[in-house]
Image (tube, rainbow, N blue to C red):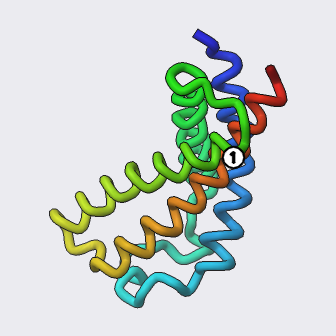
Amino acid sequence: MNTNRILLAGLVGGVFAFFVGWLIFGILFKDMMPEGMSGVLRKEEDMIIWAIALSNILWAVTIAYIFVQWANISTWRAGVMAGAILGFLITASFDFGFYSMTTLFTIQEVIIDVLINTIWVAIMGAVIGWWLGWKK
């Protein structure tokens, strides 16, 4: 297995995703989620930054693993497409599961979250695909 390649691509993608996530979720779409989410989300000053960073790195390592071990993706174009598909399917799976079994989300919040995460993971996939091709 290409463990070092996967971990390095995951680290690069995760760090990039952390900052792009801050831009997307923290600035651009900060006010997109309806009022109902205010009871679920932590205040900005109470967010646990190390856990956000770890989450981003784990997402990116997962994407890098799929790209290296199964899909042989090493371009930003293939990465953006695969990232969008994976981001959509994984986020939709979790969000619709939460929607069906909890009162955490409304259907509007599910749709918004799936769309925003699809974009975010597509960008992450582009960076990981580019990195894997550049480091060949």
Residue 26 drawn at (x, y percent): 64, 73
Q: Toward the viewer: 61 or 104?
A: 61
Q: Which residue is mark 1?
A: 126
Q: Toward the viewer: 4 or 66?
A: 66
Quick check: 1 above or below 9? above
Residue 128 drawn at (x, y percent): 69, 38
Q: Quadrant of residue 133?
A: top right
Quick check: 122 above or below 57? below
Please name the residue shown 59% across and 80% down the image: 30
Please name the residue shown 65% across and 49% down the image: 124
Q: Is residue 87 left or right of residue 102?
A: right
Residue 22 drawn at (x, y percent): 68, 65
Query: Is residue 11 visible in the rendered structure shown here?
Result: yes
* Quarter of the figure that contains the C terminus: top right
Amino acid of disc 1: Ala
Element under disc 1: helix
Query: Is residue 14 visible in the rendered structure shown here?
Result: no
Q: Is residue 118 left or right of residue 73?
A: left
Farthest right residue in view: 134
Q: Is residue 94 left or right of residue 8?
A: left
